[in-house]
Amino acid sequence: MKVVIADDSMLLREGVARLLSDAGCDVVGTAENADRLMREVQLTAPDVAIVDIKMPPTHSDEGIAAARVLRERHPGLGVLVLSQYLESEYALRLIADAPGYVGYLLKERVSEVAVLVDALNRLIDGECVIDPTIVARLMRRPQRREPLDALTAREREVLALMAEGRSNEAIGSQLTIGAKTVEAHIRQIMQKLNLPESPDNNRRVLAVLSYLRSAT
């Protein structure tokens, strides 16, 4: 896969680039700010962009803003926001407009290169990947009555693992249940969340979006 990395820290940019290159990825560009990121994406046409949440000039939420612009201009581009901030609101803002092809991971995951590469591959496939730590925090919050009140405890567990970007096989392994049981739970989740099959929507991503909206 072709990757562009944007972070104002040269050490982090070069470190992530080295890790991904060693893992077989093609790092085609790096950027220290949002403007340079836009140019690099335009010039190199990457499969995925890794973006720091806070970049110059204000170091507030430039990464989130840049990620949303990239998704608008390049619908097939995967965008992964890396952050040291454990804020579920940032994750929800990121996926609110276009929930597919976007992810939000904490920077501590960078050292787990297999986890990082797996997340990038999932984004390229159109999935939504949210850091497990954020998902765990959301699960501990009091839930609103809608739209998840109809889900069973097991269905909530399955949906939480879906929010982490887990495959059906990984969900089954985590919960010690068979593949058919996982599929049955997911069918029930889609039905209860009123997400009928459609060629225009990724129901799995929409289910995750419903989960995050109810928990923030």
Image (cartoon, rainbow, N blue to C red):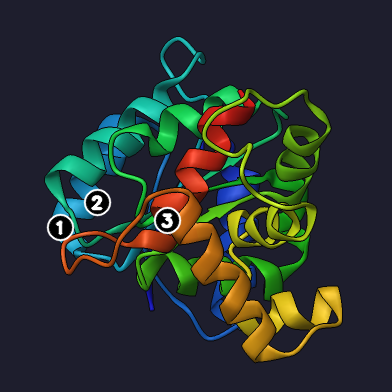
Residue 80 appears anywhere in the view: no
- Checking the image for residue 51, the label placed there is none
Residue assigned mark 3: 205
Find residue 190 and report its image quarter. bottom left
Give the residue pinned by disc 2. Answer: 40
What residue would you read off at disc 1?
43
Q: Is residue 38 left or right of residue 209?
A: left
209 relative to 202 in the view: left or right: right
Q: Amino acid at mark 3?
A: Val
Nearer-N-terminus badge (2/3)? 2
For label 3, the SS is: helix
Q: At label 1, which amino acid type do we have?
A: Leu
Of tags 3 and 1, the one toward the viewer is 3
| Disc on the earlier residue, 3 or 1 | 1
Label 3, label 1: how far apart the Cα atoms are? 29 Å
Q: Position of residue 131 (x, y in %)?
A: 67, 49
| Image location of residue 139, percent across then percent down | 77, 38
Q: Position of residue 46 (x, y in %)?
A: 27, 65
Determine the secondary structure under disc 2: helix
Mark 2 and mark 1: Cα distance apart in space: 5 Å
Question: At 59% across and 39% down in the image, what residue appears?
Answer: 148
Three-letter amino acid code at the position of disc 2: Glu
Of circles 2 and 3, the one toward us is: 3
Q: In the rendered image of this protein, does residue 215 appear above or below residue 36? A: above
Measure how far apart labels 2 and 3 are at the Cα level.
Answer: 28 Å
Q: Are marks 3 and 1 in contact (CB under 8 Å)?
A: no
Say which residue appears at 69% left-offset and 69% top-offset. 115
Residue 18, x across and y down, in percent: 61, 69
